[in-house]
Image (spheres, helix red, strand yellow):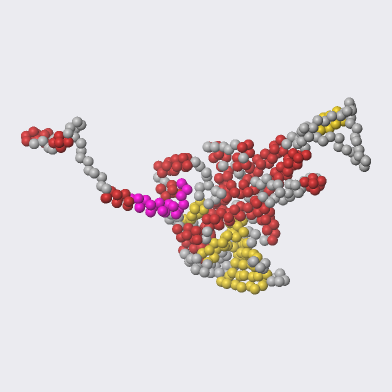
Amino acid sequence: MGRRRASYRVYGNYYDGKHQKLAFSQARHFNEFSRIFEGWRDNFCGLIVDSVNERLAVDGFRMTDEPDADRDARDIWQRNGMDAEHNAAQLDAMIQGVAYAVVWADEKGQPTITMESAEHVIVQYKPGSRRQLDAAAKFYIDDWGREWVTLWLPEAVWTFAKGTFGSWEDGESSPNPLGVVPVVPLSNRSRLLRDPVSDLHVVVPIQDAINKTVADALLASEFAAWPQRYVTGLEIVEDDAGNPVEPFKVAVDKLLQAEDPQAKFGQFEAADLGNYVTLIEMLVQHMASISRIPFHYFLNGGTVPSGESITAAEAGLIAKTRERMLHFGEAWEEVMRLCFAVLGDARSEAYSAETIWKDPENRTEAQHMDALLKLQMIGVPRDQLLSDAGYSPQQIARFADMREADAKAAMELAKKYPMPVQEPAGPPGTKPEAQKAAQKPPQGNHGNQARKSA
């Protein structure tokens, strides 16, 4: 853990905009200008992580084969404040490569979910396994500065405190009723032979290059962007100490003149800062390609695509988001199985569980509704359409009660205010009495003949 903490903190600092000091190639530049640009940071690391994390939102869980979302799972999720906590855990996982969820029981026997940083928790897998944990430990310091560690094993949970001489003491143990290590890693894009890596792993070198190039441009704008003037053929005047005296005070409202006819004035061309802009744009393009973030997110050129262009531009970002859903979804399903194991519920063995995510794509309302109406025409159920429309499982469940209430209200209104019965109308242009007479069957022989004809 001590070896990994250094890299975890580096990535966390880059996300926060606390980048490493600029590396000038010349010692003179470093000594003269390092403090000037010490606070300067053109931070793109936050954008790269946030653009994915803002599209990752868990809506609920399907723990069984039932099509509806599991209400008990949603209750556990809400009781632990996971609407906000799961977002913070996924954010840390993408920044540092991994985060952890700890499942346990409170005093009332209800499951609790605690999100932990990779700077405090570490796990050990069973030999030959990439999924089953052999142990997990959490290191933390209390308000009095004493260091503690909680060690989870399948059969017991141990707690130790670090003594005065640096040794662990005061070990206390309690049984682990779950029989498994109740810690779930949230791995960011797991690898088969390597540990999960941060989304900023390949971005940090480019971020440093952008910072250095922008600092050089600012330095050039200070010392080389102002046209430098020169004069030749002019006698250099020195003071009593032999130091040259500046002959002119150059300013916008000053005129340079010399009595010596051999004196000639001129000026050098100002530095072209456009070269720096071109280099920065190239580095930003590389960063956008590597991180799969749409180029218009960097607002290069000030133009934003629209319509089908923006859909095509965000295809890589959506694919990257769905990939994160795949890995994080497996972890959240394991968290919910552990929660039901705390309750002794059979859903602790629900390995067909499914995490319900919100749609990561941003579409116009008209396009979205049109697509849903077309899906309805091919037989997609209404609850699925409501879920695709962005409604949460709780809202969809309330819709059923609302529809039932609307139907009852309509029936009560129909009983209270019945619709008037309209009599069939006669030939046009006849009076009401004539209409009634026309509706009566004909009398006498003519009537009998009419009935026979009928």
Query: Which quadrant of the view contains residue 275?
Result: top right
Measuring from the top left, give residue 202's x and y in whole percent: 67, 48
Between 283 and 29, the residue placed more toward the observer is 29
Numbered-mark total: 0
* Residue 403 on the magenta segment: yes
Measuring from the top left, give residue 134's x and y in whole percent: 60, 64
- Residue 364 visible at all: yes
* In the displayed structure image, the side of residue 250 where residue 425 appears, left or right: left
Which quadrant of the figure contains the N terminus?
Answer: bottom right
Picture layout, residue 168 above or below residue 190: below
- Residue 190 visible at all: no
Between 277 and 52, the residue placed more toward the observer is 277
Measuring from the top left, give residue 318's x and y in whole percent: 55, 45
The region drawn magenta spans 388-407
Measuring from the top left, give residue 46's x and y in whole percent: 63, 49
Between 317 and 437, the residue placed more toward the observer is 437
Between 445 and 211, the residue placed more toward the observer is 211
Which residue sits at x=55%, y=63%? 103
* Residue 72 on the magenta segment: no
Which residue sits at x=58%, y=43%? 316
Which residue sits at x=80%, y=48%? 31
Specify the farthest residue to the left.
445
